[in-house]
Amino acid sequence: MKHFSRMSVIVAASAFALLAGCATGSQQVTAGQYIDDTTVTTRVKTAIYQEPTLKSAEINVETFKGRVQLSGFVSTRANMERAGAVAKGVNGVTAVSNDLRLK
């Protein structure tokens, strides 16, 4: 009977450790969230590319849990604001951090 109790404790502890290792923190994403973020990034890049006033090669887009960060360089403040507005209009974007800089 003691052997069964010890084995039960070991199995329960192993299961708990395994489940705790699967939990995601605020800095981690699940596979589904990663795919969603990749999709949002692609949509934002496409929208920026289709905007004739913006040079998309100089604008970087990163997404984490629906929050988009724009970085890179633009030639005017109007282009900076336009890039932010374009990103905000994309489906799946929850927030935009516009870190673009003027050349």
Image (tube, rainbow, N blue to C red):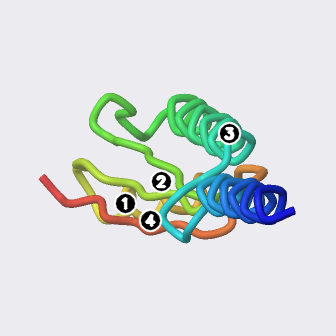
Which residue does the image show at 54% across and 71% down from the upper left? 26
52 above or below 2?
above
Which amino acid, by three-letter code, is at mark 1? Met
Mark 3 highlights which residue? 31
Q: Is residue 77 above or below residue 30?
A: below
Which of discs 1 and 3 lies nearer the camera? The answer is 3
52 and 18: which one is in front? 18
Tag 2 residue = 83
Up-down: is 97 above or below 87? below
Residue 24 visible in image: yes
Q: Find the distance from the CA under tag 4 to the CA under tag 2.
A: 5 Å
Q: Secondary structure at mark 1?
A: helix
Label 1 close to label 3 by CB (< 8 Å)? no
**Quadrant placement of the N terminus:** bottom right
The number of numbered discs placed on residues in the rendered structure image is: 4
Q: Residue shown at 74%/41% (left/top)? A: 32
Q: Position of residue 62 (x, y in %)?
A: 45, 47
Disc 3 residue crowd, few under 14, some 14–19, many 20+, Cα 10 Å:
few
Disc assigned to residue 71: none
C-alpha distance separating marks 1 and 3: 32 Å
* Residue at image mark 4: 81
- Disc 2 element: helix
Q: Are marks 4 and 2 in contact (CB under 8 Å)?
A: yes
Mark 3 or mark 4: name the one nearer the start of the chain: 3
* Mark 3 residue type: Ala
Task: Give the left or right position of residue 64, taking residue 20 as reference.
Answer: left
